[in-house]
Image (tube, rainbow, N blue to C red):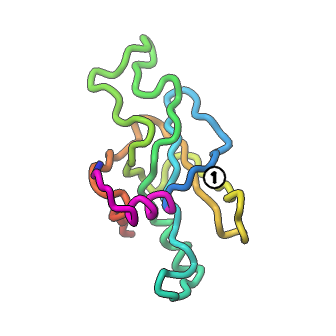
Amino acid sequence: MIKTNDASYEADLIDAFPVIDAGATPLGARVLVQLRKAKKKMTSSGILLVRETTDTEKAQNCVGKVVGLGPLAFKKRDTMESWPEGSWCEMGDFLRVPKWTGDRWEVGMPDAQDDEDRVEFLILNDHEIVAKITGNPLAVRAFV
């Protein structure tokens, strides 16, 4: 993970991953991931984004932040010993996750003005994680 003191970067990170309760706790060997929030309907320069643009960005999202770990995550299921290579991720890590896996749902922001201001969550099995992001999680983009 990159370390920076840039206030703009920190603000963008908080905007992309706002603190919000997922309304669920992962069980077994599952990992709870908060997916990066799609950009606002209007850019900072005042350009209004059409709904299809934000929907496409949301559908192509492949970056998430670990917000919960089940009690069996990264452990041998029969002995409860940790995996020989250890945990693949920890709380707060940013991950690359597959687009078409896991159970997804949305939670509305407490101060939401409309139905579009929602945060998406994903629960997936520990072995389905693609990669841990070591660079800027805001710079990662997926392609269809």
Q: Is residue 6 magenta?
A: yes
Foreground pick, 88 / 77 = 88
**Where 72 sits versus 18, above or below?**
above
Residue lying at the far top of the rendered structure: 79
User: What is the x, y in percent for residue 57?
Assistant: 48, 71
User: What is the x, y in percent for residue 13?
Assistant: 44, 59
Please give the name of the residue rendered at 49% of the width and 81% of the height, measured from the top-left corner.
43
State the extent of the magenta-drawn residues as a range: 2-15
**Residue carrying label 1:** 105
Q: Quadrant of the C terminus?
A: bottom left
Please give the name of the residue rendered at 36% of the width and 19% of the height, measured from the top-left corner.
82
Q: Residues within 10 Å of mark 1 (few under 14, many from 20)?
A: few
Hey, what amino acid is under mark 1? Trp
Please give the name of the residue rendered at 30% of the width and 55% of the height, measured from the top-left corner.
4
Please give the name of the residue rendered at 45% of the width and 28% of the height, measured from the top-left corner.
73
Foreground pick, 12 / 78 = 12
Q: Please, what secondary structure does the residue beneath circle 1 have? A: strand
Foreground pick, 40 / 106 = 40
Answer left or right for 127 relative to 28.
left
Answer left or right for 19 relative to 85.
right
User: What is the x, y in percent for residue 134?
Assistant: 28, 49
Answer left or right for 39 relative to 132.
right
**Where 35 sits versus 77, above or below?**
below
Q: Is residue 36 magenta?
A: no
Answer left or right for 119 relative to 67.
right
What secondary structure is the stretch in magenta mostly built from?
helix
